[in-house]
Image (cartoon, coloured by chain):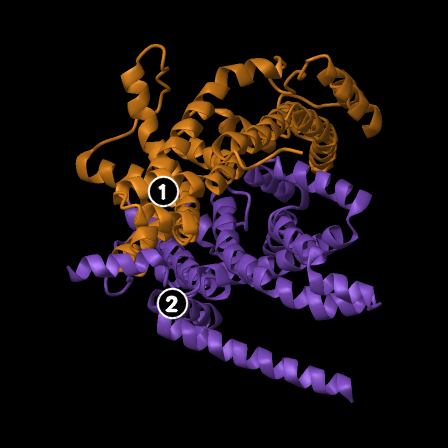
């Protein structure tokens, strides 16, 4: 077990290295460098000379070859410094500290809601395979996949406001100040995001339950005369859950993309809005920091996911 | 002589298999058949958009922000353009992006998956770390960065979506190839001195065909949705090209309270298409995946008994 963890941790090093390399080169290749945008902005206040431009470049550390820039970046990260945002000239870590909790709360709520919707639906669908209930449940889970979250969110904003004059709050209510108001604000975005993610899990739950229900030990359980609930929950669900845990792990990158969309529609000041702004203003430093943090978080989530198997299914040995 | 015989029999086999799949689809999967039917209609709408649409794509009429009426079935937008016509043309972008991006994706998945799974060793280790790294980055954010890298546009979106879906889909192909390599018939092939090419064509290709079709059926709706999301966020196909995602952003968001039909119909069309493709894909998967075949599980018998009582 411990040797497995050590090996996985070692495998993380090349993965994270590839991440830094990919993130850094892709972002720096984006045309329309931040210098040009800055010069274009300052140009409205007066003329910008070539020396001014070089001065900006030097101040931002962009006058050296890209390899040296990469080296400096890695060196900074190794010292725990994520850098200074190019426009605001404040440490990136400050903007992230102010925003991560919004995205985390939205994402966590959505993930919980997704499982609350999908697992019961998947179980029901499998137990009533090829009945109208099954067709209805499957149709609902496909509907969750098919209806794009940005459209559902738009409708949720538009129609209540036209019919009842209801508008969602546009200023952030912090959980620490007003927990109820905060939950009220997050619950609708989280339900929309959760629904859009529930489809895949519901399908997988159905598939796994169908497979497990055909196993010999389920037949034995039936023959022992156990109640339906015991057979389904104690014997079947426990075994069907293992692959479902994997898919929850793999859903996190999708979830992050979803938070970007939902945050921009409901104007929730989280990491998603920060990311969009950073892309639009070519704020390389912020973007690199955000992507690196996401990648590291995901690497750990994947490891934790794999380790959870062992607790759910004692048959799995790590070697 | 022997070769031609083998070719013929395999060709005939595939033909009957296709017919068999279609027959089973009609018989066992009524919902999937409806999905296939709607998908077909959407494809036809996309192909014949210029014959069906009542107005031109960017034709501006005098009625600005007109609500749905007999003249404009879905209303008009802030420039007086007929929304129905734009929704019809929007089908083109979604269908083309869905199919072509998926095609590119599946080809890339197959190449990476087969090479990585078959060569294995150090090559596999390095490629898989690269794939790991890629899958650790949030897809949508990476796509947004890639779009700002190559600039917005139809072909750029198709290629970018194809590459990203291709890399993440390669895992599944690799897994199948790896298990295939361990199988008795491939081992027997290697033992009897078959060339690598023969092993590929005879043993590996026929076996990864089903996963490829499954990946295809899952990626088409995903690609359509991601294109719409990108266009919605302003990182997709730029206006005035009508795309369902793009029609929901920008002006639609400015005028959505005055003219809710602007924010309704493109999303509705998008949902219907993705729903239909998913229904069809699901049914196809049920037929192709032998583990799910039938429905004669013991539990099924029990439920029927219960109902009889």
Res B79 visible: no
Closest to the observer, A291 or B291: B291
Q: Is residue A84 above or below residue A261?
A: above
Image location (x, y in percent) of residue B24 = 42, 74
Q: Is residue B8 above or below residue A22?
A: below
Mark 2 falls within which chain? B
Q: Tag 1: Cα neighbours inside 10 Å, few (<14), some, or many (≥20)?
A: many
Q: Is residue A188 left or right of residue B162?
A: left
For the point 25% across and 41% down, which residue is it?
A159
Residue B38: give its label. 2
Instruction: Return the x and y of residue A183 as percentages of the image width and height.
Output: 31, 22
Quadrant placement of the C terminus of chain B:
bottom left
Residue B272, numbered label:
none
At mark 1, the secondary structure is: helix
State the image coordinates of residue B78 (x, y, percent, origin top left): 36, 49
Give the residue at x 38% y 31%.
A112
Spot the residue most to the bottom.
B1
Apparent colour of chain A: orange
Q: Secondary structure at mark 2?
A: helix
Total numbered badges shown on the rendered structure: 2
Looking at this view, is B129 or B252 the one in front? B129
Q: Residues within 10 Å of mark 2 (few under 14, many from 20)?
A: some
Q: Nearer the viewer, residue A271 or B263?
A: A271
Please check whether the numbered discs 1 and 2 fall on a single chain. Answer: no
Q: Chain of mark 1?
A: A
Q: Nearer the viewer, residue A249 or A75?
A: A249
Q: Nearer the viewer, mark 1 or mark 2?
A: 1
Side of B253 where A19 appears, left or right: right
Report the residue marked by disc 1. Answer: A118
For the N terminus of chain B, the quadrant is: bottom right
Q: CA distance from mark 1 to mark 2?
A: 26 Å
Specify the colour of chain B: purple
């Amino acid at each position: 077990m411990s040797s497995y963890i050590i090996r996985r941790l070692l495998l993380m090093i090349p993965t994270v290295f590839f991440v830094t390399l990919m993130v850094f080169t892709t972002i720096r290749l984006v045309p329309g460098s931040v210098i040009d945008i800055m010069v274009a902005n300052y140009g409205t206040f007066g003329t910008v000379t070539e020396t001014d431009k070089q001065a900006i470049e030097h101040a931002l550390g962009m006058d050296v070859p890209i390899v040296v820039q990469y080296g400096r970046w890695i060196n900074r990260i190794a010292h725990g410094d994520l850098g200074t945002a190019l426009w605001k000239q404040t440490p990136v870590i400050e903007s992230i500290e102010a925003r991560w909790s919004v995205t985390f709360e939205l994402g966590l709520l959505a993930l919980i809601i997704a499982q609350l919707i999908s697992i019961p639906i998947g179980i029901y669908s499998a137990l009533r395979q090829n009945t109208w209930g099954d067709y209805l449940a499957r149709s609902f889970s496909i509907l969750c996949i098919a209806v794009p979250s940005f459209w559902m969110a738009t409708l949720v904003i538009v129609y209540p406001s036209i019919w009842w004059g209801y508008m969602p709050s546009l200023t952030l209510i912090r959980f620490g100040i007003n927990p109820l108001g905060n939950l009220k604000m997050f619950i609708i975005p989280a339900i929309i995001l959760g629904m859009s993610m529930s489809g895949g899990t519901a399908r997988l739950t159905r598939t796994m339950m169908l497979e497990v229900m055909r196993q010999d030990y389920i037949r034995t359980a039936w023959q022992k005369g156990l109640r339906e609930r015991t057979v389904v929950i104690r014997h079947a669900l426990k075994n069907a859950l293992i692959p479902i845990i994997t898919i929850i792990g793999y859903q996190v990158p999708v979830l992050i993309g979803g938070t970007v969309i939902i945050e921009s529609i409901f104007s929730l000041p989280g990491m998603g809005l920060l990311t969009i702004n950073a892309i639009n203003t070519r704020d390389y430093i912020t973007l690199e920091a955000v992507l690196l943090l996401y990648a590291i978080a995901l690497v750990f989530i994947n490891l934790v996911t794999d380790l959870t198997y062992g607790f759910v299914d004692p048959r799995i040995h790590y070697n | 002589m022997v070769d031609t015989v083998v070719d013929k029999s395999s060709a005939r086999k595939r033909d009957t298999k296709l017919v068999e799949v279609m027959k089973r689809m009609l018989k066992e999967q009524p919902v999937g058949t409806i999905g296939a039917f709607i998908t077909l209609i959407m494809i036809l709408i996309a192909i014949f958009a210029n014959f069906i649409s009542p107005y031109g794509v960017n034709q501006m009429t005098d009625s600005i922000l007109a609500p749905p009426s007999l003249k404009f079935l879905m209303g008009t937008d802030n420039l007086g353009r007929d929304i129905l016509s734009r929704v019809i043309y929007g089908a083109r972008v979604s269908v083309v992006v869905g199919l072509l991006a998926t095609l590119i994706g599946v080809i890339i998945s197959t190449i990476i998956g087969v090479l990585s799974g078959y060569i294995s060793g150090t090559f596999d280790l390095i490629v898989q770390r690269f794939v790991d790294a890629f899958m650790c980055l949030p897809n949508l954010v990476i796509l947004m960065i890639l779009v700002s890298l190559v600039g917005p546009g139809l072909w750029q979106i198709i290629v970018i979506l194809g590459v990203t879906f291709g890399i993440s889909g390669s895992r599944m192909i690799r897994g199948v190839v790896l298990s295939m390599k361990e199988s008795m018939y491939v081992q027997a092939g290697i033992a009897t001195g078959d060339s690598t090419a023969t092993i590929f064509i005879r043993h590996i290709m026929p076996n990864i065909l089903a996963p490829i079709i499954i990946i295809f059926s899952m990626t088409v709706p995903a690609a359509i949705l991601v294109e719409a999301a990108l266009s919605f966020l302003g990182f997709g196909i730029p206006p005035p090209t009508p795309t369902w995602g793009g029609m929901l952003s920008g002006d639609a968001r400015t005028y959505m309270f005055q003219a809710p039909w602007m924010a309704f119909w493109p999303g509705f069309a998008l949902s219907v298409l993705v729903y239909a493709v998913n229904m069809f894909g699901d049914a196809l998967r049920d037929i192709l995946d032998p583990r799910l075949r039938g429905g004669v599980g013991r539990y099924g018998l029990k439920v029927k008994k219960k109902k009889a009582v």
